[in-house]
Every structure is written in structure tokens, then in C-alpha cells.
Image: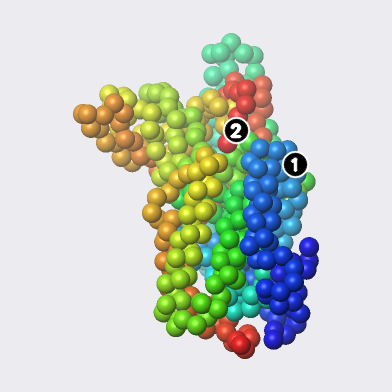
Amino acid sequence: MIRRDSFAVIAITCIAGLVLSVVPLPHWLALVRPGFLVLVVLYWSTMAPLAAGILLGFLCGLALDVFQLSLLGQHALALAMLAYLAIRFHLLMRAKPLFEQSLYVLAALVAYEVVLWAIDGWTGHARGGAARLLPAFTGALTWPMVVGVLGRFHTPR
Amino acid sequence: MAGFGTSVSRPLYGRGPSPGLRFFFYALLAALLMYLDQRGNWGGRLRYSLMAAAYPIQAVVNSPSAAWQWLTESSRARTQLRIENAALRARQRELELALMRQQALQQENAELRGLHAALPPLAKRWQLAEVINVETDPLRQRLVINKGSRDGVRRNQAVIDAAGILGQVARVGPWSAEVILITDPEHALPVQIARNGLRTIAVGSGSPDQLVLPYLAVNSDVKSGDELRSSGLGGVFPAGYPVARVIGVRREARQLLAQVQAEPLARVDRAREVMLVDFDPAHPAAPVAAADARP
């Protein structure tokens, strides 16, 4: 069972993910920066679906909206959706080897970007081409690292 | 509300609403937020308080680079400082000379216009702000600065740096403000070619080193190296401020419009300090008041 202090761990790792997601980077590096906070939310939603709920995804998305200066609720909706998917399929996901997990993460991140892109389109901001999908690919490549780092903070059941 | 999805003792698919129902609830909430933010006054007020809440974290995120800068500044050798000081002094003398000449020109200009005295300065008030967050992805080219409504910053205020126009204030929080850069794809800036006075509009490209001029006809008189200045239309920027330099013109016989690229003069992605300027509305070069100037 998940211990109570895991809430603190989740909060701290989410804040760290948020900082990594918004820290200023050179333009070319910012283009390929994986969404660290998205990966952290995905991780906790799969590995500790009881402690991290859809509310976590919603709140982290809201924080992303505020910091990335986007429409309020845009990232919140996309990240809540991702948290829901992760919670729904967490058993399936956990049973897979790391490489296969990365593929599922890639699919989830592409869905995430598509939702963001659709909302941009509906509100009349649709811009940016295939480059928008770059963070999904780098995110999938970063997933094993995220698992390695966050796995040290708790004992997966 | 706090119990949603966070209770430790509750089995995942046991009591309480199912994940699908909870997701539906949050999706509705997010949709409501988006609706309010897109078109309501209420969303603006919510955004104002969220900007206030975000300010401490932005300051913290910015602190490593600020600390690094402070460290390099303070560890510089005495000789280096002396060299820099000498260079600055020379620059100041140069500017003083230019200013003298400018005052004479202003006087002359006033006489030619039939005025008795030179015009008052165009910039009524300016203040320095520090950049605390930069967002330069292809969709959004924005800055967050550490001055807000408490310091008198208002929406649509012009933001410039030492080299030229940088952008305008898009949203204001109590201690911080969001600046939309001229390279943002949603920003359009009325400009004029300094060489021949041809007026057009410079639109952001989404890349911090490029503007595009999409509305110039194939046969218009524009060439590489032309300087673009603000034309004073649009109600935000006054006339005559440097904006960009044309770096590429492509004309294709089959198309009606030329493809013109320009490079902004302001250091859009490397700006650390920016100036917020208030202009004297009585000045003839002041921005023409538009009905509704939106970023």
C-alpha cells in the first residue's frame, strides 16, 4: 500500500517537473524539450493511481497553463485526459517492459499534443506544424529515465 | 473535492465516482475555464490572481540564471571593469554629441513647422523592467517581466529595448506582466520602410530572429538591407522607432505578393532588461489612437 508521505514525494516531484518544464532555454533546445511535468504525472498515474488522481493531472495542467501563458484550462483538459488514460490502463502499462512502455507513452503524448492543437485551432490560434510533435518523441525517449529517477522515491508494488 | 482521487484508503474501483465520471467532471471544468478565459471579464480577473500566484515560482525559476549573472558580474577583474568603463564613457560622449545635434534639429524642425518652441519629448515616462520568464516556442513568443499594475504597467503599453521595438504588454498581473513580442505569430505591427516611406505590416513568424512582411506586392520597392520603422498607426507604437532590417526578398512571377523577411533589431530572445514607455499623446509622432487596439 502507498504510504502517506508519498503525497509529499508526488508534490515535490511535480514541482520539480514544473520547473524543468518552464525554465528558460535557448530557442532550439526549447523546441525539443520533453514535457517533464507531463511525464511525471504519467508516471504517478500509472505507478500510484490511488495517490495521484485525475485531480493531479488537472492541477498540473492548470499550472502549465499559467506558466506557459496559454489558454486557461487547455493543458488542464489535456493532462486530465492523460491522467485518466494512465489510471485506466495502469495495470496493462506496468506489466510491459520499459521499451514497450515508451511506445505507449509516445501514443499518449501524441494524443496530448493533438488535444492541445485542436483547442488552439478552435480558439483561432492554430499555428506550428509537425514541430509540435517533437516533444512527444523526446518525451517517449525520456520515459525510461523518468522511471529510473522517480522509481527511487518509492517502492513499486 | 479534496477527496477526489486522493484518498489512500479507498480502492480504485470501489466506492466513489468511477475514473470516467471524474474525468468527465474535470473536462467540463476545464471547458468552462477555457470559455471564461477566451471571452469573459471574469476570466481576466481569475488570470490576474493566478499571475500573482505564479510570480514567486517564476522568480525562483529565474533565480539560477540571475545568480549566475550576478556571479559573473561581480567576479570580473578590475582591469576589465576599467576597460568597460572607458568604453561606456566614450559611448556617452558620442551620445551627448548626437543629442546636441538632435536638439538643434528639433529646434529647426519646430521653426519649419511654424511652432514657436521645440516639441516636448515624445516619451513622457519610462521604466526599466527585468525579464523573468521567456517563452519562445513557434506558437508563443512572450516574455514575463517583473513589473505589474502596482508599478503602473497597463495593457498595450509599448515595450522597447536599446535597439528597437520589442513588443507590447498583453496581460497585466499585480507584480508581473506578460509581453507579446513582435515575433509572436499573433502580433502584427504597422511599419514603414525608412528609405521611401512605403507602409506595410510586419507579422511575427514564431521564430525569435524573423519577421515577415506578407502584404507587399511583387513590384513594390523593397530590397535587402532596408530599415523598417514603426509607422505610428495601430495606436500602440509611436512613429519612427526602429523595428527591423529586411534580410531577404523573394519575387516569383506567378505570385502577386513578394515574400519578404526581416530581422528584428531588438534582441528579442536575449533581452534581460526592457523599457516600458508612456508616450505624450499630444506629440505629433505619438501613436494614432485606434478604435480598439488589440495585441
**Circle 1: element type:** helix
Judge from the rendering whether residue B292 lies leftward or rightward of residue A146; answer left or right: right
Is residue A138 among what the camera can see? yes
Identify the residue at the far left of this view: B253
Q: Residues within 10 Å of mark 2 (few under 14, many from 20)?
A: few
The spot of residue A62 in percent (x, y) is 65, 57
The residue positioned 63% from the left and 86% from the top of the image is A154
Q: Quadrant of the C terminus of chain A?
A: bottom right
3D distance between C-alphas at marks 2 and 1: 18 Å
Judge from the rendering whether residue B174 lies leftward or rightward of residue A29; answer left or right: right
Q: Amino acid at mark 2?
A: Arg
**Circle 2: element type:** loop
Q: Splitting the image into 4 quarters, where does residue B64 fall?
A: bottom right
Is residue B160 among what the camera can see? no
The residue positioned 46% from the left and 76% from the top of the image is A101
Mark 2 belongs to which subunit? B
Mark positioned earlier in the residue sequence (2 or 1): 1
Name the disc covering residue B42, or none.
1
The residue positioned 60% from the left and 45% from the top of the image is B179
The spot of residue B287 in percent (x, y) is 59, 26
The residue positioned 38% from the left and 54% from the top of the image is A130
Mark 1 belongs to which subunit? B
| Position of A83 relative to B204 (above/below) | below
Identify the residue at the far front of this view: B14
Kindly identify which residue carries mark 2.
B294
Q: Amino acid at mark 1?
A: Trp
Q: Toward the viewer: B6 or B36?
A: B6
The spot of residue A9 in percent (x, y) is 68, 79
Name the mark nearer the viewer: 2 or 1.
Answer: 1
Q: Toward the viewer: B157 or B105?
A: B157
